[in-house]
Every structure is written in C-alpha cells, then in structure tokens.
Image: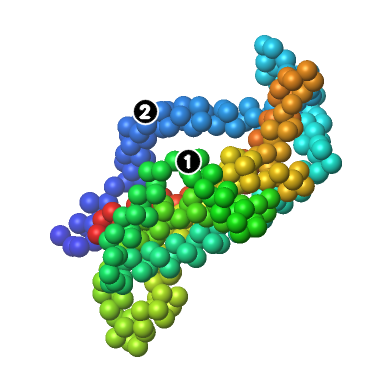
Amino acid sequence: MSTTAVLDQNTPTPTVARGAKRQRGRRHLPRIAVAGILALVFAFPIVWTIIGGFKPTQDANASPPVWWPSHWSVRSFGKLDSSGTSLFDYVWHSAEVTLLTVVLTTVVAVMAGYAFAFFRFRGKGLLFGVSIGMLLVPYPALLISLFTVMVWLGLTNSLIGLALIYTTFQLPFAVYMMRNSFESIPDDIPEAAQIDGCTKISALPRILLPLVTPGIVTVALFAFLAAWNEFLAALVLLNDNTKFTLPIALVNAQNGPLNTIDWGALQAGITVTMLPCVVLFMLLQRYYVSGLVAGTGK
C-alpha cells in the first residue's frame, strides 16, 4: 500500500470532522452557559450605571426604579460642572495625578525589582522583607504621618504631593511584581548578555526590559486603577476646589435638594470614572494575566 493511500485512510472526511466539532461543542456547552451567565451578572451593574447616567432626573430618582429612561438626557453630566469647576478640569486633575503616579511607580519598581533579582548587597533580604511587609499596613493608618511630611515639604494641596503619596502606596506591591518578573528570566540570558559585552546596567534596557513587558504593564495598570479611583488621600490632602480630582467631585455632585442623593449625577460621574479603567483593562488584559503569574514557574 502506498504512502498516499495510508494518509487518505487516516485523514478524516469533512463529514466526520464536522461531527467531531459538533460533539466537542456539545461537551463545552455547560461551560459556555455558565460563563455567559457570569458575564451577564458582572456586566449588569456597568450597563445599569451607564443607562442611569443618561436618564432624566425623575427617572433616575424614581422608586421603584425605572428600568429604561422615558427619554435620553445628558443633564446629569452637566451637574458635574458644579461649584464653578468644569468636568474637564476634574478629569484633567485625575489624569495628571494618575499619569505621574504611573511613571514614578513603574520607574522605581523596575529599578528596585532588577536590583533585588540580580544584585547582591548586604541587607538585601531584610530590605525586601520590610518593603513587602508594608502591604500588611492599611494605608489610612499612614495618612496622618504622610500629611505631616507633606506639610513639612510644602506639598499640601498639591497634585504633585498627591501623586507622591499614591506612589508610596503602590511601591511595595509593584516592587514585588517586578522582582518576580525579573527572576522569571532564565539565568542564561543575563550571562549571555555579559559575555557579549553588556554590563549589568546596560543589559537592563537593551536585553531584559522587553522580556518583562507583562510585569511592567501589570504594575502600570495597577497603579493607574488605584490612583484614578482613590478618594481618601485626595480628600485629606486637597482643600482647594480648583484642584479636586474626579472621585471628590462625585461626592459634591451627588447632593440633591434637601440632602437627598441625586442618583443621575452620581451614575453619570461613575460612568465617566469607570470607562477609562474598563477600556485600559480590555486592551491590556493579556499582559495583565501574564504579569500576574510571572516568576511562579521558575
């Protein structure tokens, strides 16, 4: 029997292949159904909030709730322009603080993680243990001390000072992530770079940084989400309405007549706040998942 005949016998016909595909689809049907239900459960609050932001005031504050608006309105978004400061200013302040936090956190975490992974120095284990131990301290307990430091430095009521506080909160986890990312690199690669003439410092931007891209993206994404949504530190440090970030603006905008909550304005503000986070996570989720598991298999 020729080789061609043997291959023809072993190759499934299109009908058999379609049948096997349908069988695999039926086998995965319960998983698909469960995944679809979970997706709907998690997506419902997001969809409900976005729709609520476009409801007129009487529909947004109705009890029992109105599931679909009688007409679409952007009046709730206009209420975010209260107290003489526009919504764009609030978003810009949050973006300024967040981007500065992301840059500072990422740069310091990359350098510290690289040092903990590849350099030997006295007190290395103790220093790393102390930095990780800071994760066990709730950050509100540190706010009074940090506020005192900001007063001494003259950085109260300052977006730069707020970014420094956010960076302080993010660094322990970020350093831990980057140390794990660098340790996931096989030992042969840094050694080969040194043989080719690179020093430990020059090997970082030329060879190693592209290999830890998922870890860098994960650290930057965590820093972005934390700084963009953080409320308490901004409330303590900022006292000028013209410098308020978006989360503080939401608290001011939610107040309706007679101390009631204006649900339409609140949902409109939440929509503006969460959309950048959702978009960034959807774009970077594959790096995010890879970065979280970096270092676990070495």
Q: Nearer the viewer, residue 160 or 222?
A: 160
Residue 33, by quadrant, is: top left
Residue 118 to residue 59: above or below: below
Q: Residue at x 73, y 19 (%)?
A: 260
Q: Position of residue 62 (x, y in %)?
A: 72, 15
Q: Residue at x 80, y 33 (%)?
A: 79
* Residue bearing mark 1: 141
Q: Position of residue 214 (x, y in %)?
A: 43, 59
Mark sitting earlier along the chain (2/1) = 2
Question: Would residue 221 be seen by someone viewing this image from the given angle?
Answer: no
Q: Residue at x 56, y 62 (%)?
A: 103
Q: Secondary structure at mark 1?
A: helix
Residue 130, by quadrant, is: bottom left
Is 167 positioned to the left or the right of 94 in the image?
Answer: left
Q: CA distance from mark 2 to mark 1?
A: 46 Å
Residue type (three-letter) at the residue carrying disc 1: Ala
Question: Would residue 9 be seen by someone viewing this image from the given angle?
Answer: yes
Assign the C terminus to one quadrant of the image. Answer: bottom left
